[in-house]
Image (cartoon, grey):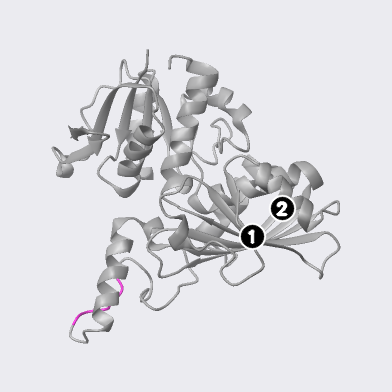
Amino acid sequence: MGYRVVVAGATGNVGREMLNILDERQFPVDEVAVLASRKSLGTEVTFGDKTLKTQDLDTFDFAGWDIALFAIGSDATKIYAPRSAAAGCVVIDNSSLYRYDPEIPLIVPECNPQDVHKYAKKNIIANPNCSTAQMVVALKPLHDRARIKRVVVSTYQSVSGAGKGGMDELWDQTKAVYNPTDDVAPKQFQKQIAFNLIPQIDVFMEDGTTKEEWKMVAETKKIVDPSIKVTATCVRVPVFVGHSEAVNIEFEDFLDEDEARDILREAPGIMVIDKREDGGYVTPVECVGDFATFISRIRQDPTIENGLNLWCVSDNLRKGAALNAVQIAELLGREVLKKG
């Protein structure tokens, strides 16, 4: 017996990827409902070899459904997630709305699977920010070994993190650079993104950090350990899919780079590609479509007593969003619902 699964926001980048991953991972599904706003009503999406028509999110009855994967943004989630939860359908939400609610678990299955049992307070589970998800997969096994004191991370985040509009803007601006009559004025981003990079993701906060940077701090503490100090600089780069991060880690105990490499090779969800030669590392183009978080450039930091540097790359539409949500659904099914 399988699950009755809802995908809300099924016509967007993340919603479509959720459907792909449910099929690829052979999630035990008896029935799938795909939901969208009225402007996208009737749009067809694929699930394996099936073609499904979207239903109206506003009028959908969640009663009798088991799990709802939400990819509809915070404003809509605020309306529809409580409806689903009240009807007994567990929400796994990709927006930022519930990530910092102390009564709602924020889960990366490789890091804190035990927190899935906390879902019952509100029948909602939060999915982390894309930049946080891939980083904590790498941090957790190293933290278990040598305890992390401080993390300094610089991100290089693709335009797909801003949705289809971000991808369209990079494409249109790139073409316009070669055709001066076309308009290259930014619409989705704060400045031109083609052949450029922008050191701002989300809005600025009073202390000068951006909301994206604050998310990485708060979510790492909630998922891994509240004692870890994190400082981040988040940058949008002209890459369509795949987030990259340069991560500097300071530990309480000494951790040799070779041991760190061995630990990461054995850790769930990680693929280590780390050869000290030209091209012996992974770039965003190479990670697209893969489930793994790739780690390269592991090396000691000689400027601090117990420090390491590493390079972390992942498909942000997968591990940063859709894959992690489906992994949470798998965890929920395995540990709690136990139907599949």
- Residue 77, by quadrant, is top left
Q: Which residues are magenta?
A: 182-186
- Estimate the x, y position of residue 89 in percent, counting from the top left: 38, 21
Who's the residue at 83% across and 59% down the image?
306
Give the overall secondary structure of the magenta segment.
loop
Who's the residue at 39% across and 78% down the image?
195
The answer to which of 99 and 242 lies nearer the viewer is: 242
Amino acid beneath label 1: Asp
Number of residues whose C-alpha sits closer than 10 Å to that of mark 2, classed few (under 14), some (14–19) or many (20 or more): many
The residue carrying mark 1 is 274
Number of residues whose C-alpha sits closer than 10 Å to that of mark 1, classed few (under 14), some (14–19) or many (20 or more): some
- Estimate the x, y position of residue 8 in percent, counting from the top left: 30, 36
The answer to which of 87 and 18 lies nearer the viewer is: 18
The residue carrying mark 2 is 261
- Are the residues at dot 2 and dot 1 in contact (C-beta closer than 8 Å)? yes
Amino acid beneath label 2: Arg
